[in-house]
Every structure is written in structure tokens, then in C-alpha cells.
Image (cartoon, rainbow, N blue to C red):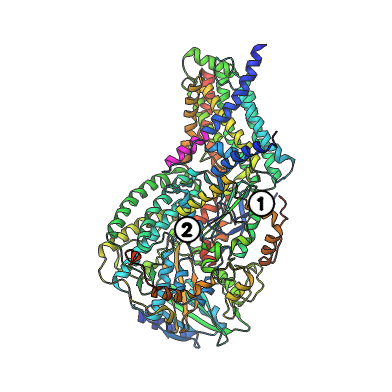
Amino acid sequence: MREKATTLYLGPQHPGITGNMMIRLKVEGDTIVGATTEVGYLHRAFEKLQEKRNWLQSFTLMCRFCVPETDPMEESYARAVEAIEGREVPERAKYIRVMVLELARLASFMLWYGGQNGSLGLYTMGQWSVGDRNYILDLFEELTGGRVYHMYIWPGGVRRDLPKGFEQRVLKTLNYLEKRLDDYDDLMFDNAIFKKRVQGVGIVNKEKAIEHGVVGPVLRGCGIKSDIRIDDPYEVYDKLDFEVPTSDGADIWARALVRRREARQSIRIIRQVIDMMPGGSVYNKIPNPQKWTLPKGDAYVRTESVRGEIGMYIASDGGLNPRRVHLRGAAYVHAITLLEDVLIGENIADVSAIMNSLGTCPPEIER
Amino acid sequence: MESIWYKILGAIITVIVAFIVGLTYMGLSRKITARIQNRKGPPFYQNFIDALKLASKTSAIHHGFMQHIGPAFMMITSIMSVLVVPVLTGDQWFSNLNFKGDLIFLLYIMVFGPLGMALGAGQTGNPNSAIGVTRGLSQMVGFEIPWVMALVALMMQYKTASIVDLINIQQEQGVWLMFSSPFAFIAAVLAMLGMFRYSPFDIVGAPTELASGPVSENGGKYLFTLMSSNSIFAFAKLTLYVDLFLGGASNIVELLIKTFAIYLIPMLYGTVSPRYRTEQAIKYFWGWPLFFGFLALLYAAIF
Amino acid sequence: MNMQEIKENLITHVKANFPEAAEKEFDGNRLDFNVDKQCIPSILTYLKDRLGYIHLSHIACVDWLEEGEFEIIFIVWSPEEKMKVFIRTRIDREKPVMPNIDMIWRQANTYERELREMFGVEFIGLEAPDEFLLEDWGGPPPMRRDFDTEAYADDTFWHRPGREDALDVREEIIRRSREEIPDFAKKYSR
Amino acid sequence: MINDKNSQKIVDIIQNWSRKHSIWVLAYGTGCGAIEIPPTMTSRYDAERLGVRGAATPRQADVLLITGYLTTKTLKRVIRVYEQMQDPKYVIGFGSCTINGGMYYDSYNTIKVLDKYLPVDVYINGCMPRPEAVLAGFGKLQQLIAEGKANGATKYKENLEWYRGNQKKIIPNWVMPEYNW
């Protein structure tokens, strides 16, 4: 006899949901037979607001799109504006941008370590990694004045030069974090129970990935070597030497492995950038923001964030304000159609782990 | 006749001691977990404050009669099980109300509470509660089997179902039962991991999966009752372990040291383990713990 | 093959099948095609199946209020050729109707839901719940240029007093900068 | 005897002391401020040493932390969650956008002033408030509780019509059970 499916509302107030969204699950016993996501709890209408702001004011809205990693949005906006206007960026600013982006990546990985393990009940990991993340945020605070919102990478360069001795402090932090990452491996990747929980769960295979336009670690977790930093290089990524890790498992475990190795690649990139950092100015002066107009045109730039590629489309009508800004976050494709697809057939115990593994970030979907 | 009054007075004091010790242990566990997690952690008496606060919260929600009964069942079970476990051996006051055959009685009574809780949680109508209860009962099915096997092995080996007799045997032989019947001890300790519901067996109230499981709808006084009954129950279980396998305790310091040593096992294991899925937990209990349970039975049958 | 050859190759292929597509070349790895809205599904299918543009990167909509048109831009990406292609089309702003492409890429469903809600663009045969980001929304589609969000916010929500004087902060700064700085403060001011 | 004024005072002092040192925060990240909650709760800032810890369901929580802007869609859920919580309950408004709309002052989908819709006991300003600021906010709340001044819930009950009117003004489709405790 077929069991009658019950409806289970997961969220918006639920500790297992990453952020503020809801999944309506149809459950038979412990198995999910249907899922519908409901988003929109965080819709602030950024794109509408930006149409009312001038080009510099709307830059300050940019970092608020998704909070775990704010710099790729600023980077996208800066590059899109530069592409429309044809503005040059000093060489040193490019290196600093890469450094900031990779530091933000690393910080976001630390948060992911906490989230992924917290979703599986290993709270010690979250306490360690989120605590250690503060060391990176300290660096950001010194550099930009803010822990979470930096507003540092802006059109024409970066807002100000590195403080004296900043590189040494970055290297010191990296040395510490590298040691800590090994500790995390002992706790997480050598953990038999963790392996048992995540292997074979939340499978996104190649066909599904292409059908849903999946990006980032999820795509690399199913064996496709795809990284915007290599495929469509921006800033100075084409001069740097780093690997793009892939894994064939297509499950949570594979994506965890990808992220684990990517965190080390980020450290490697930052070290290279600090070695290669040229001198010079960091900022090409923009005109008076109140009178700053961009030529008519549009641009689409993509930036690799920790969750995958972020695409930003900006159209200018030659005026003081953006005509249209549209940001497609990485989670935009993961969190709705793909999540609904992946959850079918899984255990309700794994919903939170799958969401964390896909990198679902609701503010990025809803903007 | 006088000794009965002593015993009853002692039993009342035992319950109070159990409440205090249980909450302190939970507080210490929070503190130790915090130290492992690189932070200062709450003071060890934090759980008393929490309990006091919960008791002083209003509970205006009403989901029906059974919701009140659930926590009450748990409380009654906890108190009954702590009453039949001799806390201090040889002490007239604190040998409690145990009798011949109390191991079998204990086995029965320890299952009774979660069942009552299941009824109460079912009444609240929260799907998380319902799923949590199902999980709790499945997990109980998992760890009860090796646990019962270990106890049956002890009963077979020493031809008694009385805890006091078992303690006396240990004192006569001069060897703790954890050495003289090691397989039963191993099976019992592995089952204990599930009994205390620390990670990886905290599947009942897993926050990221079920909010807080069966107690989702219970706040305030209900939660206070559950919390205190849990602490009493934890003390009862720990004392039972000490009595059965560690030769009992003749004074309160010895008791605290031995119980805390036992308590550290599930707690420390919990800080470094993620949570099992329900079927994985049951599979785990029906693996090695069951194997050691069989070994214990064989061992008891042969010797 | 360098970028220029890829572009020429692409243009010849697309032109052979869709003669009305008007191309526009850009620096770098970008190429635009202006097409009619009816051939959007066929050109996207062609790009995906034949030319390897397997990744739908973006669907954007721009409201050209003055011209009375919506511009819808599909951006596809080829991992092999490292090329992004913009397929642009213009539709009438009064009766915005588009063909549905979520059978080509499943994820397009999300974009289309958003466009339907935010711009009122109707996609023929789109199967999705009516509401996406908004709930019980009574007004016009909010991302249209003629919807004034500030006026709506003033109407609907209560503003805390005190914000309005922040509007003229520049004048205030100028006024204050003309004031005499006391001697003791000069020591600390930069 | 128990209704005697002095003994009631003593009971109040003990209860307020316990409430002050045991603050269970509902795990509901309503906005982007949720990103600073993990650092506050974890090793460097460790709010648990002050007795602040998370609670999974509204029935068990004491504090509703509104972490940032509230869209109208979330506001509906937040009100429902708030009404499910048991007395005594407190609301902390977190971030500039709960105070005056912050940088979303002209957005059509976010509310600008939180205390029009829910009784706020403590505001923490800043965008984003640092974990120290959050801890200071909790400290302020503790102080208010100890003095018996954190009475937002009573205010809500007494002025329910006014709050309801404001809430219903921006939530057109109001399908919620009546608040009766």
C-alpha cells in the first residue's frame, strides 16, 4: 500500500535553511517525493534602487547582494562600468583586487566549513572555522574599514592603497590558516561518519548540471573543469599559476573535496600575488560623481565567486544613472529548479546538507 | 520499621541530588565542549539559570491533554528509575528502594518514558515532533537490543537480577564487572552512546533537520520538566553503569568521579562526530554492539 | 583558432540559418545578434546543439520606456570557444509576449518567472507558480521604468522623521567648513 | 502570602536575574545581518558565555533578533513567529535598516521602521553592526531585563489594535490566527 504523502514546511524559520527561504516538501516516511522552493523573503529591489542612484552611489549597494562573500559583486560592477566606459585600471590595483577577492573567497570557504558541518551536527568545526575566519575579517577591517561590507573595489581601481606592512600580515594569517586547514581535514575529511553521511547524497550528474546551467564547485564536483578565472580570465588571473580542482563523485563529498582543495589554491594565489605585486598608483580618478555619465552601451561581466560564476549585466543610456543592472548570482540557478530536482528521493535529514553543499544563498536569488 | 523511613527520606534526597548533579554535568559538558571548540563557554551553573528561566516563562499554548502528560511521563519515569538504583552501596539511607529483580523492572521502566513522550508529542500536531518521535523510537529499538543483551548476560552469569547482589559480588571478588565480563561492558557502553543522545546519535532533536524534534512545540514549563527529568534520568543511568560495571560507590566523591568518567565517553565522542542518519544509527547499533552482546551472552553461558 | 576566426565562423554559421540576424562585433570575446523574437527558441537551440553554446549565462530585460519597447537579452557561453554570444530582441512594451525557452534550459524557467513578475512579460506556455518574489502584489510590475518606487514607499510605509534633513548635507558641510575652527580643535583635526 | 508585595518583589528579582542570564535567541536570519550572528556565537566573541544561545523553535525562544531589513513578505512570517513566542519575549532590531530603512529607504518592498509593527526593546545600529555591537546590544537588553523595563510584549498586548492596523496596512492578505495569549 502506498503511503500518503505529508507536507513538511521547511522554513522560513528553520535552523537548517541557509538564509531566509522556504522549501515545501512532500514527504513519504523519511523520503522526499516532491519539493517546491519559495523565495522572495529577501527581495529588496536593488535593481530598481540603482536606477535612482548615480553610478557611484549604486556601487555602495552592490556589496549588499549576498553577504557571505561581498567582493565579487563589487568586482563585477567595477568591471562592467569600466567596460562600458573604457576606463583603464592601474596594474597595482588589479593585483590588489585579486588579493582581496581571494581573501574573500577564503573567508567564504571558512563559513562554508562551518555551515556544511553544522548541517550535519558537527558543531566543533563551525566553532573553529568561523572563529578563524575572524582573522581574515581583521585584515579586511584594516584594509577597508569594514568586516563584511568593504566597498573597496570600485570603478577605476581600488579605494586606497595597502597599509604599510599589510602584505606581511596577510602572509602571517595565511601561514596560520594553512595549519588550521590541516586540522579541519583531520576533523572533517578523515571522519568516517562524515563520509558515511555525505557519500552518494545530493547527486548532480553531468547531464543535470548542463541542463540546469550549474556553475562553480557544483559543476567541478561532477567532473567538468570550468572556472571563470581560467575560461574567461579577468584582472591578472591569466598571469597566475593555479589549478582548478575537479572531482568525479558528483555528490556532497565530491563538492566538499573540491572546496577543500580550492581553499588551498586561494592561499597559493594570494602568495603569488603578493610576490608579484607591482608599485604605482591604485586608482584612476573618476569625474565628479554627481556629473559622471557613462556612454550608451551595455556590458556583461562574470566573476568567479565561491559559489560559482556571478554574471552582471549593466545597460547604460548615457545618463547619470544605470538604465538597468541585473545580477545573476550563482545560487540563482542552483536554488530553485536544481534544488527542486535534486531533493527528490533524498532523505529529509539531508536537505540542509544538500543546500549547504550547493551553496544556496537566498539574498543572491532575490536581490 | 525505622529503616523504611530512612529509605524514603534517602530516596527524596537522592532525587534532589540527581537533579543537581545531572544539571551540573550538563553544564560541565557545555563548558568542556566550549573549551574543545576554542571558546570560553558558559559557566557550569548555566543550566540552573536556564531551568529557572524556563520555569518562570508562561506557557499559554494548549494543544490538548496529552501534551501535559508527555513531560509528566518522562518525569515519573526518571524519578522511578533513580529510585530503584542504589546510589551509595552499604549506606542505609542511599541504597534506595531497590529489590530483587530490579534490573528487569529498570529495563521496562526506561522504555516507558519515551513512549509517553511520543504520545505527548503526537498531540502537538507539529510534523517535526511526529518525525522526531518516530526517529526516537527507531533509535531506541536500535540501542535497546545490545543493552538488554548485556544485562541478560550479567544476569545469566551471576544468576541474579538484583543490582545490590551484583555490587556485592564485585566487592567479594575484588574485580569490577567491566573486567570480569568485558564483552557485556563493551556492549553496554556502545549502547550508552545512543542512550545519552549526544552526537552522532542526536537524531531525535537534530536542529538542522527537525527544528528541535519532539519538543518543538514545548516551551517554558514543559521544557523545564523535560530538562530536569533528563538530568535525573542521566544521573540514574550513570549510577546504574557505575553500580553494574565499576563496582558501585561507597561515598559521594567516588560516585561523582566514577559517574563523570562514564559521562565523558558519550560527550567527548559527540564533540567530534557528525550526526548519523536514522537508518545508519540503527545499522550501527545492530553491528558491533550487537556482536559484543552476543559475545557477552556466549561468555556468560560458557563461564 | 583565434578570437577573430571564431567570430567570423560563428557569423557565417548563424547567418546561413538565420539570414535576418543582424550581428554586431565587440572587442574581446563578445558577439551580439539582433533577431526577431519568433526565432529566439530556434536560434538558441541551434547555438546549443550545433555550435556548443551549452551554458545559458543570463537573461536580462531592459525597459526602454521612451521607445516603448522591452529589450530582452539572452547571453550564452561556449566553454570550448570561450565566447559569449548576446541574442537580443525587442518586443512591444504594451503587449509583451515572448516564446518560452525553458525546455531548452531548465534554469530559464527561473529567469522567465522573474521577468513575468518584474516586467509583466508573458511567456507562452510557462508552467510555474504565479508568485515568485513578491506576495500579494497589487501594483504594476515593479521593475518597469514608469513605476516610481520612492513615491510608492512614501505612500505605503511610514518613514522615521529625521531623514529629510540629511538630503542637504552638502550645504551643511560647506556651511560648517566656513566656520572658524577653535584653536584646541585644530590640534586634532587633520 | 505569595501575593504579598515584598515577596513578589523578591520573586521578580530572581526571575529577572534568571531571564537576564539566559537569553535564547530564535534562529531566524531574516536579513543579511544573519552573517554576523555566527561570529558572535562562535569562538572569538562567544556569546554563550553570557548565556546567549540559539533556540530552534519560537516556542522555546526569548529573543527575536530581526537581522536587518524586513520585506513585507518576511514581515508576515515574523509577526506570526513573534506571536508564537511565549512571554516574556523581547525583540532586538539589528542594523540601520530596521531603524529608518537604511539604504533601502525608497524600496517598495521593505519596511522602514520596525517599531511600527513590532515592539522593539533594543536597537543595534550600523550596517553591518560588528559582533561587539551585537554583544553590547545583548548587554543593554540584559540591563533592561534586570531593571524590569524590557516590557515590549506588554506594550504589544495593550496596543494590539494599533499594531494590527499598521501590520494590516501593508499585508493585504491577512490570514492568521488571532493573537490570544
Is residue B26 within the magenta segment? yes
Residue D129: numbered disc:
2
- Crowding around mark 2 (Cα neighbors within 10 Å: few <14, some 14 to 19, many 20+) is many
Residue type for callout 2: Pro
Quarter location, residue A72:
bottom left
Q: Which residues are magenta?
A: B25-36
Q: Main secondary structure of the magenta part?
A: helix
Q: Residue D73 in the image: state x and y as whole percent.
A: 62, 63
Q: Nearer the viewer, residue A172 or D151?
A: D151
Examine the rendering and report whether any part of residue C118 can be seen.
Answer: yes
Please name the residue that numbered disc 1 is placed on.
D154
Instruction: Tell me the residue at 25%/69% (across/down).
Output: A279
Chain letter of disc 1?
Answer: D
Q: Nearer the viewer, residue A327 or D72?
A: D72
Residue A337: numbered disc:
none
Q: Quadrant of the C terminus of chain C?
A: bottom left
* Rendered position, C111 above or below B193: below
Instruction: Tell me the residue at 39%/78% (across/down).
Output: A83
- How far apart marks 2 and 1 lie (CA) works out to 28 Å
